Image (cartoon, helix red, strand yellow):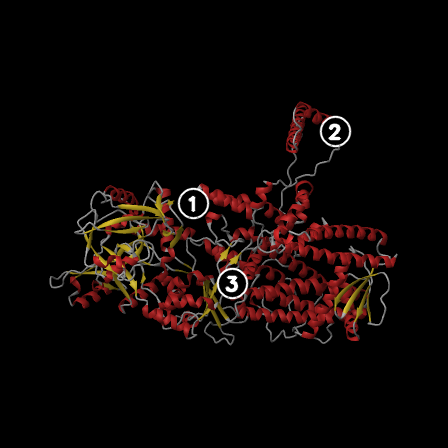
């Protein structure tokens, strides 16, 4: 168990022994502990080494282990080992010998099989005997099962009405428990108004010398549920918000929610179908919209509750929903202004069309499914799967000759809409066909052969079929050559404008029919596998079709240039700067933006088609922008139309566009619509433009760019000064989070914990097919063999920030989050110990300052505290979150807990016995209080709950100090400027000496015995330094006495020796503390083993064919083994020599 506990400590912050994946080291050590886990370690033993157990179960559930060893059952109860009677052995051996007389000798495998059979038979007999015995006995009275309480779970049970302050008078529980710590704080913070910019000031308009910080949340979908991407976004944003608030700035983090047009409509339509068997068309538009609002009011604030669970310090009084009246008015105003300026216009172009949704969809709603070869995919509305990933070649006959032109396509059904064949102008194979036409096999259509540079003459035959109405590239060719645009699909995916028998067919049924018809006419050539990308609608899972539709577009050319210039000129900063290339690529090559959506849920477009009841005015067409007007009301639109056509209002009839605006349109004006734009409000004047926009880099174009463009267009100002883009969260293996892989993690499951069965149950509720469910279950079993342990909000937030290094994706391992829960426990214990040390009567000084009486340890810890303050300050300013987490983690764990708290224990012990050291103890207490107070404040933006809980237990410097840690001042480098490089250097040297002594003690197994320690120093300065820190060395190294020696002083016999540095050698007195003869015998055995190993290795390495036959990697490993063994042998010889001196 001692060895396992050492391993347990090593594994606390890690998943595997080395790196982020299973290695040879894991396999070797797991194999070594296999038998103890299988036969000796009962559940209670395993709880004592939770990290080893977690690591071991993770290892044995990896595919490599399962393949070799199969399922491994862990020990539940150690059974007694019964020695087999000698007679039984004899019989067994006679039996086995006899068996050889009747046939050939049995193999080892056969003997093992027989032994297993006998064992099973014996168990079966024992079971039968037990059952028979039970029947004869009277039934015993059932004992009431004690209530099972999970280890480490402590709950807060003091009745506290929501919004009232939590009880902090009672004693702190023995250990940290997230459930206890996170209870009751958030409602109190909210009720006290700590998250509001008005807190602590008369008016938000009054000038604040510290400045203003404003950031709006990337509004999550109203249908959404929290995932780790949200958790990362909110952990970073809340840390930044809390930091700015603690710096004294007027701080606002504005919450909001997006109406998510398509997603919400799909959810409500499914609900209607499931519960009432109705479609939206059965209800009609008005009634359906009422149903959506009803659903929103019942279920729509779920994500807000989840955000509160994460500790997000948002001003909930300013929460906005994009369909609220205030925001809807702003959306209407934005459309009308941009339409009046002709920035928004009407045009008939190709759009991404979902036949299932009957709507155009944006690029972000199109998933690109990559195929490598022929693949059958499920498509909504089709019983059979549809074939994709093939290239079909067929021939068009050239009119008036026997010649034919061979073309190829991945969508054979679209040939019904072909209106030309294109070849490259420089292709010699087709020069003689200039001016010629080809004949369509299924109708009378004659199609020109056009010459266009877009054709790749090295691909296939160098001839390309052109379908201008159903392909983006072909559309442009059609425009250039004035070709016919024949639309062959209606909104439902049924064929139109085609000859029988294809007319009215479903598009993918026509795929099969067209192929067969071409074969029947002898024009089919071949079909072969073809890697391709299939566009799939992320909402409906339908195959997206390019379709010609009249829609509203935003002219982005000028706005895109302004957005690009803002970054080029440094007015807008994008962090990290490697995203600049993407930004400029998009902005400099921007296309116009289609903003129409054929939905009912959303902002209905305030545009009206005009019919003039006057024979002098000819009727207009839908795509003619001249016949469209926009208005805040029908009356306003009529007046605009009457003025445009120079007729009276009575002659105007209007039809409002049925479509709604793209959701990204309302999101694009979110930074100013939330403050009441276009009205001049106090909030708009104070908080717009904002300070920062923080979001994932995957929506840089879809959201960030549009906010910048629309902000500049409608307000003349940039909506924010900086954009910080965080990375994408992946799983521990670097895979994208995907439901089908079973690696999507709900942050609330990490916070509260969930069993493996619970994770499996979530899969059963998803829309995955049974094969994917099984695959996902295996993924969960491999990654979370024991489920996900309860980590708590603080540990999750800290882990997410610790991982957020700029410029790379985040491979998040849940087991690492557990390591940060252990860190919370360390904090908890440190503060508990410190409070006990401070005592009930302790009064902190009014200001954190040096008294001049600080000991060397005090000066050092205050120096390290100042370094931590500087690193956190620099980290926040540079958005370098790992630098913040590392500095504050190192300060608490490795400097305050491991060194300072340990080194000052003797001071407090002496103070109780000796009045003379009481003043030193008082100075020490003030230093300790400063460290706790500042250390908790440094940590507060990252871990708001545990820091609040602990801060509330500390005494205050002044009665008027802030009521919550969240509104205290963040430690500043001007106040905490006590860093001393000299003190740091001295302590670094002292810790090297301490570690060397500890290492020697471990080598000689001195666990509890204190030994004298002679430190041989190179010069008087080193002696003086050792004397100055002798108490710290003695305490931290668990030594009896620390005796510094000058270079010419002799070290007593009987010491073990180790070099700490070029200035100091450690000599540990072992004489009289250990059984020398016994130790020498052990070492001699070890020496013999090492020599044998080395001899064997040398023999292997000196073979003539070793260098040729043995792989280079193995040769390196052998050389390293030999080197390590040589070092170990030298150590053993040195130890034997030292011991013999004592004999």
Near-viewer residue (1080 or 764): 1080
Question: Residue 1055 or 229: which is nearer the viewer?
Answer: 1055
Asked if 17 appears above or below 94 in the picture, the reply is below
Q: Nearer the viewer, residue 521 or 134?
A: 521
- State whether residue 784 is above or below residue 218: above
CA gap, disc 1 and disc 2: 60 Å
Residue located at (77% from left, 27% from top) = 87
Residue 425 at x, y percent in the picture: 26, 62
The residue wearing badge 2 is 89
Q: Check disc 1 and report the residue beneath it.
A: 767
Residue at 27% from the left image edge and 60% from the top image edge: 427
Q: Nearer the viewer, mark 3 or mark 1?
A: 1
- Residue 1046, percent across and down? 82, 72
Q: How many neighbours does mark 3 have within 10 angstroms: few (below 14), some (14-19), or many (20 or more)? A: many
Q: Name the residue under label 3.
A: 236
Q: In which quarter of the image is the C terminus?
A: bottom right
Q: Which of marks 3 and 2 is in front?
A: 2
Circle 2 — which element?
A: helix
- Tell me the distance, in whole angstroms, between the alpha carbons under discs 3 and 1: 31 Å
> Badges 3 and 2: C-beta atoms under 8 Å apart?
no
Q: Earlier in the sequence, mark 3 or mark 1?
A: 3
Viewer can see residue 958: no
- Contact check, label 1 and label 2, Cβ < 8 Å: no
């Amino acid at each position: 168990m001692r060895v396992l506990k050492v391993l347990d400590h090593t594994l606390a912050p890690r998943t595997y022994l080395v790196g982020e994946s299973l290695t040879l080291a894991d396999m070797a050590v797991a194999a070594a502990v296999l038998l103890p886990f299988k036969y000796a370690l009962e559940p209670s033993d395993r709880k004592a080494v939770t990290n080893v157990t977690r690591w071991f179960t993770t290892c044995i559930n990896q595919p490599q282990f399962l393949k070799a060893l199969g399922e491994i059952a862990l020990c539940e109860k150690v059974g007694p080992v019964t020695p087999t009677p000698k007679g039984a052995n004899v019989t067994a051996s006679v039996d086995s010998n006899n068996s050889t007389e009747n046939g050939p000798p049995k193999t080892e495998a056969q003997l093992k099989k027989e032994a297993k059979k006998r064992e099973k038979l014996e168990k079966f007999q024992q079971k039968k005997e037990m059952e028979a015995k039970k029947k004869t006995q009277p039934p015993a009275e059932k004992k009431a099962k004690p209530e099972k309480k999970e280890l480490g779970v402590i709950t807060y049970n003091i009745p506290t009405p929501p919004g009232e302050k939590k009880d902090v008078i009672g004693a702190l529980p023995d250990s940290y428990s997230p459930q206890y710590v996170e209870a009751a704080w958030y409602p109190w913070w909210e009720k006290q108004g700590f998250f509001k910019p008005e807190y602590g000031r008369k008016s938000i308009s009054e000038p604040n010398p510290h400045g203003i910080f404003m950031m709006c949340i990337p509004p999550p979908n109203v249908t959404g549920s929290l995932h780790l991407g949200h958790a990362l976004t909110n952990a970073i944003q809340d840390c930044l918000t809390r930091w700015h608030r603690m710096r004294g700035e007027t701080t606002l983090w504005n919450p909001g929610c997006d109406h998510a047009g398509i997603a919400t409509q799909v959810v409500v339509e499914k609900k209607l179908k499931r519960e009432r068997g109705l479609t939206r068309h059965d209800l009609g538009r008005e009634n359906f919209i009422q149903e959506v609002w009803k659903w929103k009011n019942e279920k729509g604030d779920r994500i807000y509750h989840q955000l509160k669970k994460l500790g997000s310090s948002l001003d909930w009084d300013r929460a906005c929903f994009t369909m609220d009246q205030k925001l809807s008015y702003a959306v209407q105003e934005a459309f009308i202004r941009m339409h009046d300026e002709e920035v928004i216009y009407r045009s008939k172009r190709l759009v991404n069309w979902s036949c299932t949704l009957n709507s155009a969809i944006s690029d972000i709603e199109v998933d690109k499914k990559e195929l490598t070869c022929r693949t059958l995919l499920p498509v909504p509305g089709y019983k059979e799967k549809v074939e994709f990933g093939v290239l079909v070649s067929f021939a068009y006959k050239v009119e008036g000759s026997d010649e034919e032109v061979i073309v190829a396509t991945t969508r054979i059904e679209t040939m019904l809409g072909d209106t030309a064949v294109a070849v490259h102008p420089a292709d010699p194979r087709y020069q003689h066909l200039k001016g010629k036409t080809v004949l369509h096999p299924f109708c009378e259509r004659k199609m020109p052969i056009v010459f266009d540079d877009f054709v790749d003459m090295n691909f296939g035959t160098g001839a390309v079929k052109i379908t201008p109405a159903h392909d983006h590239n072909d559309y442009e060719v059609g425009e250039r050559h004035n070709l016919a645009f024949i639309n062959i699909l209606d909104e439902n995916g049924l064929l139109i404008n085609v000859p029988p028998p294809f007319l009215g067919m479903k598009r993918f049924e026509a795929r099969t029919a067209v192929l067969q018809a071409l074969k029947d006419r002898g024009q089919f050539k071949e079909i072969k596998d073809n890697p391709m990308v299939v566009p799939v609608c992320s909402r409906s899972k339908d195959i997206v079709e390019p379709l010609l539709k009249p829609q509203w577009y935003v002219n982005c050319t000028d706005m895109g240039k302004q957005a690009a210039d803002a970054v080029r000129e440094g007015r807008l900063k994008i962090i990290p700067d490697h995203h600049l290339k993407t930004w400029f690529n998009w902005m400099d090559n921007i296309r116009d933006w289609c903003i129409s959506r054929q939905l009912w849920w959303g902002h209905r477009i305030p545009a009206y088609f005009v019919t003039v009841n006057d024979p002098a005015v000819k009727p207009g067409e839908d795509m003619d922008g001249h016949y469209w007007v926009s208005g805040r009301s029908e009356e306003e639109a009529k007046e605009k139309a009457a003025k445009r056509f120079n007729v009276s209002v009575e002659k105007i009839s209007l039809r409002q566009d049925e479509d709604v605006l793209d959701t990204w349109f309302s999101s694009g004006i979110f930074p100013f619509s939330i403050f009441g734009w276009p009205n001049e409000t106090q909030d708009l004047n104070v908080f717009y433009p904002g300070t920062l926009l923080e979001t994932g880099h995957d929506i840089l174009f879809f959201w960030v760019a549009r906010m910048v463009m629309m902000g500049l267009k409608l307000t003349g100002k940039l909506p924010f000064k900086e954009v910080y883009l965080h990375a994408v969260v992946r799983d521990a293996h670097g895979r994208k989070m995907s439901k089908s892989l079973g690696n999507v993690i709900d942050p609330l499951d990490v916070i509260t914990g969930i069993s493996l069965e619970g994770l499996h149950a979530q899969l059963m509720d998803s829309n995955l097919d049974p094969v994917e469910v099984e695959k996902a279950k295996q993924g969960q079993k491999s990654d979370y063999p024991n489920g996900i342990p309860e980590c708590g909000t603080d540990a999750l937030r800290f882990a997410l920030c610790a991982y957020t290094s700029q410029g790379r994706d985040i491979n998040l391992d849940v087991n690492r989050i557990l390591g940060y829960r252990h860190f919370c426990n360390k904090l908890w214990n440190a503060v508990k110990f410190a409070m006990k040390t401070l005592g009930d009567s302790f009064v902190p000084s009014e200001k954190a300052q040096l008294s001049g009486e600080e000991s060397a340890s005090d000066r050092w810890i205050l120096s390290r505290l100042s370094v931590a303050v500087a690193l956190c300050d620099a980290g926040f300013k540079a958005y370098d979150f790992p630098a913040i987490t590392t500095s504050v983690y190192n300060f608490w764990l490795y400097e305050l807990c491991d060194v300072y708290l340990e080194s000052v224990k003797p001071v407090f012990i002496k103070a109780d016995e000796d009045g003379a050291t009481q003043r030193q103890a008082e100075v020490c207490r003030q230093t300790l209080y400063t460290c706790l107070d500042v250390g908790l404040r440094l940590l507060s933006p990252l871990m708001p709950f545990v820091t609040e809980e602990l801060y509330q237990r500390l005494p205050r410097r002044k009665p008027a100090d802030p009521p919550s840690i969240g509104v205290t001042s963040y430690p500043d480098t001007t106040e905490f400027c006590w860093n001393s490089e000299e003190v740091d250097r001295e302590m670094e040297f002292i810790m090297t000496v301490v570690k060397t002594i500890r290492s020697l003690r471990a080598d000689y197994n001195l666990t509890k015995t204190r030994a004298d320690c002679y430190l041989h120093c190179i010069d008087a300065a080193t002696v003086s330094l050792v004397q100055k820190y002798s108490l710290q060395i003695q305490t931290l190294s668990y030594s009896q006495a620390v005796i510094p020696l000058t270079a010419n002083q002799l070290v007593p016999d009987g010491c073990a020796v180790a070099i700490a540095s070029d200035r100091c050698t450690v000599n540990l007195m072992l004489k009289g503390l250990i059984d020398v003869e016994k130790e020498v015998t052990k070492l001699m055995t070890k020496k013999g083993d090492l020599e044998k190993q080395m001899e064997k290795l040398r023999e292997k390495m000196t073979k003539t064919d070793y260098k040729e036959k043995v792989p280079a990697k193995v040769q390196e490993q052998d050389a390293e083994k030999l080197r390590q063994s040589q070092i170990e042998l030298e150590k053993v010889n040195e130890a034997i020599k030292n011991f013999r001196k004592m004999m």
